[in-house]
Amino acid sequence: MPKQVDYDSRRRQIAEAVCRLADEHGPEGVSMRDVAARAEVSLGAVQRCFRTKEEMLLFAVEHVGERVRARLTADSSLGQAIDEIALLRDEHRAEARIWLAFVAQAAIKEPLARPLRNSYAALHDLLVRLATGSGLADPPAAARALLAIADGLTAHVVIGHLTAQEAAEVLNTHVAGLWK
């Protein structure tokens, strides 16, 4: 009897390998053969899950967005949520590098832009929900600003312009100032 494969689990395993390779070499430096080796599966297993490299990269970028959203809970505060989204903590530095590498690629490759727009839309909706009823005059505008600030601070930390602590102070000051 053939072995049953959990394709969802296999796709996530492959996405993790894509992320590790993208962190090291950027998305353009990821090959299906290298992903197979890193995921410790056959090239055929990768090809059964993803027909093309582009399809594999698209799934990986969605996977990163899902990981970030999964860390947010229904009872997160606005400050906690934006702290998670900004990816400032050391344990999230690889995710931050991967996310920014995908954003850079998405600027010139429309297919990669779609899942990023979807992730940003989901994060925006979450921030609007958290901001609604908190006394802010315009929760959608606050959510847009917070996402932009989070991305900017993430980039500043990744390139070494700011430390994670400095970026967190900027973010916390901005969030605290929303109600003034």
Image: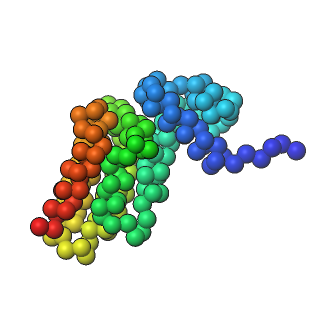
Q: Is residue 11 left or right of residue 151?
A: right
> 109 or 119: nearer the eye?
119
Residue sitting at x 24%, y 73%:
134
Q: Is residue 90 left or right of residue 138?
A: right
**Residue furthest out toward the right:** 1
> 159 or 49: nearer the eye?
159
7 relative to 103, above or below: below
Among the 4 quarters of the image, the one containing residue 76: bottom left
Residue sitting at x 23%, y 34%:
161
Q: Tell me the colour scheme of the image.
A: rainbow
Q: Is residue 114 visible?
A: no
Residue sitting at x 18%, y 70%:
136
Q: Is residue 132 left or right of residue 84?
A: left
The x and y percentages for residue 146 are 24, 55
Q: Is residue 74 visible?
A: yes
Q: How many marks?
A: 0
Among the 4 quarters of the image, the one containing residue 17: top right
35 relative to 64, above or below: above
The x and y percentages for residue 73 are 43, 65
Q: Quadrant of the N terminus?
A: top right
The x and y percentages for residue 169 are 23, 51
> 91 or 13: nearer the eye?
91
108 relative to 130, above or below: above
